[in-house]
Amino acid sequence: MESKVVKVESLTPDPKNARKHNDRNISVIAESLNKFGQRKPIVVTPEGVVIAGNGTLQAAKYLGWKELSVVEIPKDWDEPMIRAYALADNRSAELAEWDTAILSEQLFELENELDLKSFGFELPSVESDEAPLDDFKSYDESMPTTHVCPKCSYEWNGSSK
């Protein structure tokens, strides 16, 4: 796989892209590009149609970028293979899950270093070191026994009484 740099104007958004990018999503992608630069190429056909990375293209245009790094799909891929790849690329990220304990730890470590909201994360505001008692659910036999701390997202099982 070999990447190359091409003019943004030479790229065409995929007219069959099943994934839609709202303004918030494009804003988050743009902020990431602005802060970190492009760290992975977008995937295009030999004709320059974007198969994976349509949101990145849209955000780059918003930022006024003139060039992007791309990789081309294999020349022997037919239309069904191209469509399947585009769908698989979009779907695979959706199926991942966050490790909430690690995520919470990292977000709290970074909250004073970066504007996490610009990257799509919002931390709960905690005005004191103690969480309000209403935030902790009392034990109820009909409900799952997993509890989550509203401040740090620590999870535990059992009664909270």
Image (cartoon, helix red, strand yellow):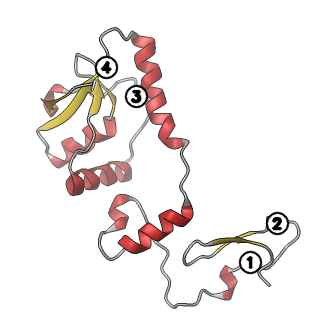
Q: Position of residue 124 (x, y in %)?
A: 50, 75
Amino acid of disc 1: Lys
Residues at marks 4 and 2, CA–CA distance in whole angstroms = 49 Å
Q: Is residue 73 above or below residue 9?
A: above
Q: Nearer the viewer, mark 3 or mark 1?
A: 1
How crowded pointer 4 is (Cα within 10 Å; few <14, some 14-19, many 20+) is rated as some
Query: Image quadrant for the C terminus?
Result: bottom right
**Residue of label 3:** 17
Q: For the residue labelled by badge 1, is the local secondary structure a helix, a strand or a loop? A: loop
Q: Taking 89 as reference, is 153 left or right?
A: right
Q: Nearer the viewer, mark 1 or mark 4?
A: 4
Amino acid of disc 4: Ile
Residue 160 position by quadrant: bottom right
Residues at marks 1 and 4, CA–CA distance in whole angstroms = 52 Å
Q: Are marks 2 and 1 in contact (CB under 8 Å)?
A: yes
Checking the image for residue 137, the label placed there is: 1
Q: Residue furthest right?
A: 141
Residues at marks 3 and 1, CA–CA distance in whole angstroms = 43 Å
Q: Are marks 1 and 4 in contact (CB under 8 Å)?
A: no
How crowded pointer 3 is (Cα within 10 Å; few <14, some 14-19, many 20+) is rated as some
Q: For the residue labelled by badge 4, is the local secondary structure a helix, a strand or a loop? A: loop
Residues at marks 3 and 2, CA–CA distance in whole angstroms = 41 Å
Q: Are marks 3 and 4 in contact (CB under 8 Å)?
A: no
Residue at image point 29% right, 73% down: 113
Residue 11 position by quadrant: top left
Q: Taking 6 as reference, is 21 left or right?
A: right
Q: Are marks 3 and 1 in contact (CB under 8 Å)?
A: no
